[in-house]
Image (cartoon, helix red, strand yellow):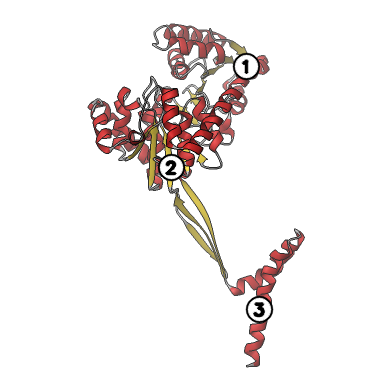
């Protein structure tokens, strides 16, 4: 079901995972480009036509925006006990993200004042997937940091049948006091947020996960609107030893494998016997899962168990993988964390499964995938803020700095740059001579 590799199999191991890095196919990108063009040119008319064609839902333009009464009614159908759990999660997520908030600053150097002004984005669009599964956690993880940052306008888009199938999603939106909600999904929703329609005003940034078409649409509109990241299939890497509980490891690997058939679940261990135990547990637990077909295919195609001589030998492999989620079991000393440079989130300890971060701990579960943790970070408050540099120079400070500025400008062949400084120095000299003559 799942292959077991040794250190000598490194090339084969990475070659097998390489095709997961292709986030969208050419066919998907071509179809998305057409959808985006239609929405950009036709606005609401394209949204309604595409919603009927792709989601098989006929709507009018007036039905695109959810009225507050309709949102409350949909939220009321959610299980009250589950809503209370949402409230606890919101508290934790808010507490974590408040610590990320950055402030404006400035400092003085002789006759110069330099600083940085930090402001929230003016508007953000949050995409919440629909389909068979409910994603209230997507609402929380994307909306809470935007609210902490102080974004004044947050618009949520979700497919037309989301609230009917999953009232808990409506409840999550209601709990966060979001009043701008639209029933539109897929690539057409991303295009509407990026370019605006008669009903949906455009936003500055688009965040939130989705299928291949949503990911391709975000890639297509990037530059006209900012995006969080191009998210790919989910992945987990487990670092363990022969002393780690194989039942826990298998359960954690399956928690990612059940996401979709392209998900990846990998375990590093220092024992062949332990690897066999983990493989056996995977087979036993897989048989009990409702989504065993999906999880089984993910394990067959992209799952792996790698046997090393020691846990230290796995570090180089892990940094090259740059996994979305990294779990380190307690049999590995916590000092190993200092050697891990590339990972979306690190979960340490036998009782810290990745699901803790997905729903409740407070850290953000919107994470870089497909090796992009080498240069991307988890979604945070900083993603909803922007920075403006502030520079104030006095006449005296410009005089002191003019020689350096002029020399550097002329070295680049930019004479007008240099003259913008020297003209002020000439004017200053003339003013000084005039005053002396008087």
Q: Is residue 326 above or below residue 11?
A: below
Viewer-nearest residue: 79 or 35: 35
The residue pinned by badge 1 equals 16
Q: Earlier in the sequence, mark 1 or mark 2?
A: 1
Spatial CA distance of label 1 from label 2 is 37 Å
Spatial CA distance of label 1 from label 3 is 69 Å
Contact, mark 1 vs mark 3 (Cβ under 8 Å): no
Local secondary structure at mark 2:
strand
Viewer-nearest residue: 252 or 430: 430
Which disc is residue 427 wearing? 3
x then y, percent, for residue 79: 24, 25
Local secondary structure at mark 3:
helix
Q: Nearer the viewer, mark 1 or mark 2?
A: 2
Which disc is residue 124 wearing? 2
Q: Is residue 259 above or below residue 105?
A: above
Give the tally of numbered discs: 3
Pointer 1: residues within 10 angstroms few (<14), some, or many (20+)? few
């Amino acid at each position: 079901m799942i292959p077991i590799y040794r250190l000598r199999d490194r090339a084969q191991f990475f070659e097998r995972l390489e095709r997961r890095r292709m986030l969208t196919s050419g066919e998907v990108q071509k179809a998305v480009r057409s959808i985006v063009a239609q929405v950009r040119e036709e606005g609401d008319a394209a949204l309604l036509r595409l919603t009927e064609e792709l989601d098989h839902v006929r709507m009018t333009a007036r039905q695109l925006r959810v009225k507050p009464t309709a949102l409350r009614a949909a939220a009321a159908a959610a299980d009250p006990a589950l809503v209370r759990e949402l409230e606890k999660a919101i508290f934790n997520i808010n507490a974590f993200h408040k610590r990320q908030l950055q402030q404006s600053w400035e400092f003085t150097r002789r006759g110069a004042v330099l600083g940085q002004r930090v402001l929230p984005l003016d508007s953000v669009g949050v995409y919440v997937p629909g389909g068979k599964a409910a994603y209230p956690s997507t609402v929380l993880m994307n909306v809470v940091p935007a609210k902490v940052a102080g974004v004044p306008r947050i618009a949520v888009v979700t497919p037309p049948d989301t609230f009917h199938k999953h009232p808990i999603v409506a409840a999550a939106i209601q709990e966060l006091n979001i009043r701008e909600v639209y029933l539109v999904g897929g690539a057409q929703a991303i295009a509407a947020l990026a370019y605006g329609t008669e009903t949906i005003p455009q936003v500055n940034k688009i965040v939130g996960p989705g299928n291949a078409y949503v990911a391709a649409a975000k890639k297509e509109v990037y530059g006209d609107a900012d995006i969080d990241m191009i998210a790919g299939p989910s992945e987990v890497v487990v670092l363990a030893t022969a002393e780690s509980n194989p039942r826990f490891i298998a359960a954690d690997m399956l928690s990612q494998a059940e996401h979709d058939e392209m998900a990846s679940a990998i375990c590093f261990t220092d024992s062949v016997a332990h690897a066999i135990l983990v493989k056996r547990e995977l087979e036993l637990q897989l048989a009990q899962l409702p989504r065993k077909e999906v999880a089984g295919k993910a394990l067959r195609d992209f799952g792996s168990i790698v046997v090393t001589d020691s846990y230290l030998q796995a570090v180089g492999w892990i940094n090259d993988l740059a996994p979305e989620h990294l779990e380190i079991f307690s049999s590995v000393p916590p000092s190993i964390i200092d050697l891990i440079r590339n990972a979306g989130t690190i979960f340490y300890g036998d009782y810290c499964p990745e699901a803790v971060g997905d729903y409740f701990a407070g850290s953000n579960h919107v994470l870089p995938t497909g090796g992009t943790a080498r240069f991307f970070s988890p979604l945070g408050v900083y993603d909803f803020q922007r920075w403006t540099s502030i520079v104030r120079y006095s006449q005296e400070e410009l005089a002191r700095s003019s020689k350096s500025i002029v020399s550097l400008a002329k070295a680049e062949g930019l004479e007008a740059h240099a003259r913008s400084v020297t003209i002020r120095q000439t004017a200053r000299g003339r003013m000084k001579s005039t005053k002396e003559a008087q």
